[in-house]
Image: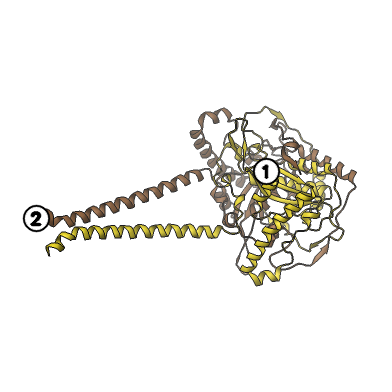
Chain colours: A brown, B yellow
């Protein structure tokens, strides 16, 4: 009894340490499973490379709101702006023609290997560069790849990631996907198309003094620029398919030796349509389904 | 001594509990300060309404990668696609003309109150609706406001938020901003422009069975659509300024009675340019600054 009484403090101490240890461990496990859970919703299908601080913590300045007419550096002199104007009848006709023409545009995966004049691509990129951008930062880099080896390396990188994507997804929702799957991870057009245009968004710029300059709304700006690029391609009779290669950004950036402030947003294979090109017979929504008049 | 010996286990136990409590508390404080820190970087300039789950946890399916040609519902029949083709000389000429024309586009804040035919706006929106979108979800709603009262309410909402933005920012970086500030939070064009086009992104759709259907890459899709819309406006001689009203989304959505799956991305005041319209004398980057050839 005396021995037991003497040992009691030791027992209690050990017990407390054990309880404390178990308690701490359970907390750690909870944290870990929380991380895992949030990780699961964010992975593996999130292209984390596309996330950047500016999208999460974009700060506001007057240029964010009204785009493209002011620069960070200085107040520019203002000049009169008197663009061409058309009569109501002309406007109506022009608007109908442009709609009909743009409505013929389709995403095309069957691209002819026939060469395309590089000067045309230059002008298409120039046109994309006329897009407005937050604070006139022009936060875009268009990498135009025609080198066969580089195109093939791009294909290998994308197909490798895509195969993982497909197989993981198929493991996940097997039945549904098997039914729907008509394409696979093989992207022949990446070898075949005379040009691949890889559109990078610049998440920040570097000022002459070496300081970083945040590019607010860079993803929206670059996407708008891509919309104008698609119009410019349609205007010259070239086709493309808008793709967002998932999780390939870092590898492609490294292959193309782009700086770390540039993140791949969109990849466009560009060329003439193949003579046997086919597209799904899809319909677009009616005007009444996309427009509300107040 | 006996009393002390008897109390020892109690002391040890109390000591252990206190240590355990302190330890747990320090952990909790750390977590809280971490949360606070991440909260601080995200506020107050983040437009949280623009964040949506799809941007954070966008999952992948085959339609994400290659846009716009497949639907979630079914496999569509495929049809031949044989668009117009031009000779190399024609392509070059067309690309130069389109570039020159689009390069005349400027963001304009001085908009004439002169009425614009609604049919022209209809065609412009139709044209925007030809954009590709992730999985052909067409995740856009264009709210076209011409009603003077509603326009004025929109102006009030935006100016109120803008005043807060400006004043808070000025408190923050007073000297720098005072020097640069040429515009303020007064947005007269919101009353004056014959049309305000509010572009909403649909973060998800609702299937006939009532289930939600995630709209992957909806922000990129809607921004691309806006790029095509800007080209369509330029094509008919109308002007606009691309604006992203910060933190006004929920109020404007409520005013315009839009459902909660729609988030305001861009607001475009549209009309003829005012006769005394002026724009900053800015330059665009050279082709060599935006294009890399590989």
- Residue linked to disc 2: A2
Query: Label 1: how many residues lie within 10 Å, few (<14), some (14-19) or many (20+)?
Result: some
Per the image, the residue denoted by label 1 is B258
Q: Nearer the viewer, residue A251 or B216?
A: B216
In this orientation, does residue B139 appear? yes
Q: Secondary structure at mark 2?
A: helix
- Tally of marks: 2
Chain letter for mark 2: A
Distance (Cα) linking label 1 and label 2 = 79 Å
Give the side of residue B224 with respect to residue A24, left or right.
right
Q: Nearer the viewer, residue A168 or B184?
A: B184
Number of the label disc, if any, that sits on residue A117:
none
Report if the CB atoms under discs 1 and 2 are less than 8 Å apart.
Answer: no
Q: Nearer the viewer, residue A253 or B280?
A: B280
In the shown orientation, is residue A186 left or right of residue B287? left
A278 relative to A33 in the view: left or right: right
Where residue B193 appears, as percent x and y from the top left, is: 80, 53
- When asked about the image quadrant of residue A73, the answer is bottom right
Image quarter hosting the N terminus of chain B: bottom left
**Element carrying mark 1:** loop
The quarter of the displayed image where residue A2 is located: bottom left
């Amino acid at each position: 009894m005396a021995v037991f009484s003497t040992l009691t403090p030791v027992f209690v101490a050990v017990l407390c340490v054990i309880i404390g240890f178990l308690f701490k461990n359970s907390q750690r496990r909870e944290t870990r499973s929380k991380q895992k859970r949030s990780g699961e919703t964010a992975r593996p299908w999130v292209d984390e490379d596309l996330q950047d601080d500016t999208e999460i913590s974009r700060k506001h300045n007057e240029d964010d709101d009204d785009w493209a007419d002011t620069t960070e550096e200085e107040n520019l002199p203002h000049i009169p702006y008197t663009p061409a104007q058309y009569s109501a009848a002309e406007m109506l006709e022009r608007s109908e023609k442009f709609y009909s023409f743009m409505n013929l545009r389709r995403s095309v995966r069957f691209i002819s290997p026939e060469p395309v004049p590089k000067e045309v691509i230059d002008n298409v990129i120039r046109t994309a560069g006329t897009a407005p951008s937050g604070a006139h930062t022009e936060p875009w880099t268009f990498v135009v790849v025609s080198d066969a080896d580089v195109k093939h390396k791009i294909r290998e990188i994308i197909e490798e990631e895509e195969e993982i994507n497909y197989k993981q997804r198929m493991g996940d929702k097997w039945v549904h996907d098997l039914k729907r799957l008509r394409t696979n991870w093989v992207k022949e057009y990446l070898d075949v198309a005379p040009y691949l245009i890889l559109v990078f968004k610049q998440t920040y710029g570097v000022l002459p003094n070496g300081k970083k300059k945040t590019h607010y709304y860079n993803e929206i700006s670059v996407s708008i620029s891509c919309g104008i690029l698609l119009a410019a391609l349609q205007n010259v009779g070239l086709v493309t398919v808008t793709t967002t290669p998932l999780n390939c950004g870092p590898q492609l950036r490294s292959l193309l030796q782009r700086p770390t402030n540039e993140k791949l947003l969109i990849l466009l294979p560009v060329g003439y349509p193949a003579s046997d090109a086919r597209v799904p017979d899809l319909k677009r929504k009616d005007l009444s389904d996309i427009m509300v008049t107040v």
